[in-house]
Amino acid sequence: MADLTQHEQDESEALLHSALAGGKLPRWSLPALAVGSLVAALVLNVTTSVAGVAGTLIVAVLIFLVSQTAWSFAVEGRRHAVDRLATTGIYATFLIALVPLVAVLATVIVRGISVISAEFLTTSMRNVSPRSEGGGIYHALIGTLEQVGIAALIGIPLGILAAIYLVEYSASSSSKRLGRSISFFVDVMTGVPSVVVGLFVYTAFILTLGMQRSGFAGSIALTILMLPVVVRSTEEMLRIVPRDLREASYALGIPKWRTILKIVLPTATAGIITGAMLAVARVAGETAPLLLTTFLSQSINTNPFQGPQASLPIFIWDQFTSSTDASVNRAWGGALVLIVLVMVLYLTAKIISRFTGVKKS
Amino acid sequence: MSTTVEPPAPSAPVAPPRAIKGAAVRRGDRVFLGLSRGSGIVILVTMAAIAAFLIWKAIPSLQANTANFFTTSEWSPDANPAYFGIAALTFGTLMTAIIAMLLAVPVGIGIALFIAHYASRRLASVLGFITDLLAAVPSIIFGMWGIEFLTPHLTGLGQWLTTYLGFIPIFQNDLGIYSRSIMNAGIVLAIMVLPTISAISREVFLQTPRAHIEASLALGATRWEMVRMAIFPFARPGMISASMLGLGRALGETIAVALMLSATFDINPHITEPGGITFAANIALKWNEAGTIGLSALIASGLVLFVITLAVNMTARVIIARRSEFSGAN
C-alpha cells in the first residue's frame, strides 16, 4: 500500500523516536484508511449483497473502524488502539445526529416549497374538499398566532414573576421551603407530557367549568407548557445579575420592588427575551394538547374565545391524516410554514443571546 | 412596561428614623412580593390540579370497567358493558421507549463528549447550536417525516434484522411487512430525545474540574482513558438523569408516535412487524371518537402516563440535584 520513499522516511523518523516514545501511526494513515475503506465498501457494493447508500456507508465505516484499530494495535499498542476506536466512535455519533436533522429539513423544504403560493398563504379551507387542490392555511395561521400569542401574554409574565420570587424573595429563611418546592416542581413540570396537559385543560376547564372547546382553551394548555421553560430561563438570567448592582440600589434607599423593576430586570432583559422566545418556539408546534382542547375549523375564525378555531399543527394533522394526495401536499406546505415560523423565532432568540446578555463580572 | 404604574413615592429618600423602620412593609414591596409569590404558587397549584382533575374524571370509567384495568389489552370503553385495559398500551409505550433509549443514550452521550471535549471551541458552539435545532422541530413534523421518508429507508434494516437475527424472537417477522412497526417508532423517538440527552450531558461534562482532566493527561492517559477515568466518574449522576429525562420525553411523546404506529391493541413482541400503540398516541387517536366513558377511560390512561412520567422525572431530578443545578428547560 505504502510507496517506498514514504516508507523509508517514516522508518528513519521512527528510529529517531523509538528511544523515547512508542510507535505511532503515520499522519497519512487516517485519510488513506478512509479512502481505502470507502473503496472496499464500493467494491463490496458491486460484488456482494451490500446495497444502498446507507448500507455501503455503514460497511465503509465498519471496515475503517476494524482496519484502523488493527493497525494501531499492531503499531501503537492496545491503549492507543482503544483510544482511536473511541475517537472514531464519537465522531461517528455526531455524523449520525446530523443525518436526521438534514433529512428532516430537506424533506420539509422539498415537499413543502412546491405547495407554497400566495393563494396557499391567503385563503382558508372553506368549501375545499380534502380531495381537491387549492385552499390554504390563512385560517390556521391566524389561529396559531392568536393562540400562541395569548399563551405568551399569560405565560411570560407569570413565568417571569415566579422566577423573580425564586431568585429575589425565596432566599429568606421563612420562604426557603416554598422556594425549594416551587423550584423542584418547575423542573418536574418540564417533563409532564403535552398530551397530559391537554387532558388536564379538558377535564378542568371544559368538563368542570363548562368552557367550550376553543382557541382559548388551547392557549391555556400552551401556557402551562410554556411556564416552566420561561421560569427556568428567567431564573438563570436573574441569577447572573451581579449582586453589587442590587446592593448599590438598596444603599441608595430604593425599595426592593423598584430595584427589581428598574435595575435587575433591565440588566437581564436580553436573556429573558431569549428564554421567552425559545419557550414560544417550543409550544408553537405542539399538536397533542390542541387536538384535545380545540375544534378544527376549515374557515377563518378570528375570535379565539368562541367557536372552533384552526391552528397550524391541527391543520397539518387533519390534512395529513386525510391522506389524499392533495391534502398530504397541503400538510407539507403547512409543515414548511410552521417550521419556518419556529426556526425564525429560535434563530432570533439565539442571535439576541449571542450579541447581548448579561456580562459576567 | 416598568414605567406604567408609579404610586406616590411611599417613602422619601431623606426619611427620619421612623420611616426606616417602616421600610420593610412598603406597599409596593408587599404587592410585588404577593404577585411573585402568587405566580410561584400557581405552578404548585397547577401540578396538584393536574393530578386531582385526572383522578376525579377517571373514576367513572374505572367504575364502569368490567375488565381488569391493568392486565387487559383490549380497548372498548364505549361498549356495553365497558371493557378496557392498559396492558397493550404499557407494552407499546415501554418497548418504543426502550428502543429509543438503547439508540439515543450512547449517541447522545457521544455527541455531548464530542462537543465538550473533542471539537474545537468554535466548532463546538456551532455544533451545540445544530443539535439544539433538532429540539426545535415540532413533533408532528418528525411523525410525517418518519412515515414518508424514514419508513421506506428502514424496510431494508428490518429485512436485514429478520434475515440474519430472526432466530431472536423479537426480530422475527412472519408478515413480511416492515412499516408502522414499534421499531420504526422507537427510532423516530430516539432522534427526538437526542437533543435532551446530549444537551444535559454536555453541561455536566463541561463541569468536570479542569484539574482532573489535566492530571490524568499529565499521567500519560490517552484521551479516551481521560474520558473514562476523569469525566465519566464525575458526570455519572448527570448522565443518568439526562437519560431519565430523555426517557420521560420518550414515554410521553404523542403525535409522532400516533402517526408512526398502526394502533393495534395486542402485545406483539415482534418489533419489526406493524402494530403497537402507546398511552399518548392512543389518547390522540381515540379522542374525537370517544363517548363519555371512552373519554373517561382515556383520562384514566393519561393518569397512568402522568404517574409514570412523574416518577421518572422526579427520580432524575433527585439524582441530579445531588450534584448541582441542571435543568432540561434551558
Image (cartoon, coloured by chain):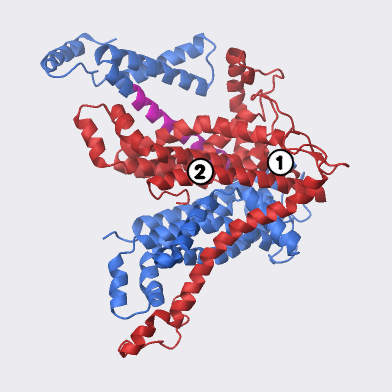
Please check the rendered image and state whether residue A98 is part of the magenta-colored stretch, yes or no.
yes
Q: Eyeballing the image, is B309 above or below A240?
A: above
| Residue A210 found in image quarter | bottom right
Residue A186 position in % (x across, y down): 51, 55
Magenta residues, start to end:
A85-112
Q: Secondary structure at mark 2?
A: helix
User: Marks 2 and 1: CB-CB under 8 Å?
Assistant: no
Q: In percent of the image, x 53 and y 41: which residue is there?
A: A105
Residue A294 position in % (x across, y down): 71, 56
Residue indicated by mark 1: B282
Q: Is residue B217 visible?
A: yes
Colour of the chain lettered B: red
Q: Eyeballing the image, is B35 above or below B259?
A: below
Label 2 is found on which chain of the structure? B
Q: Secondary structure at mark 1?
A: helix
Q: Which mark is residue B315?
A: 2
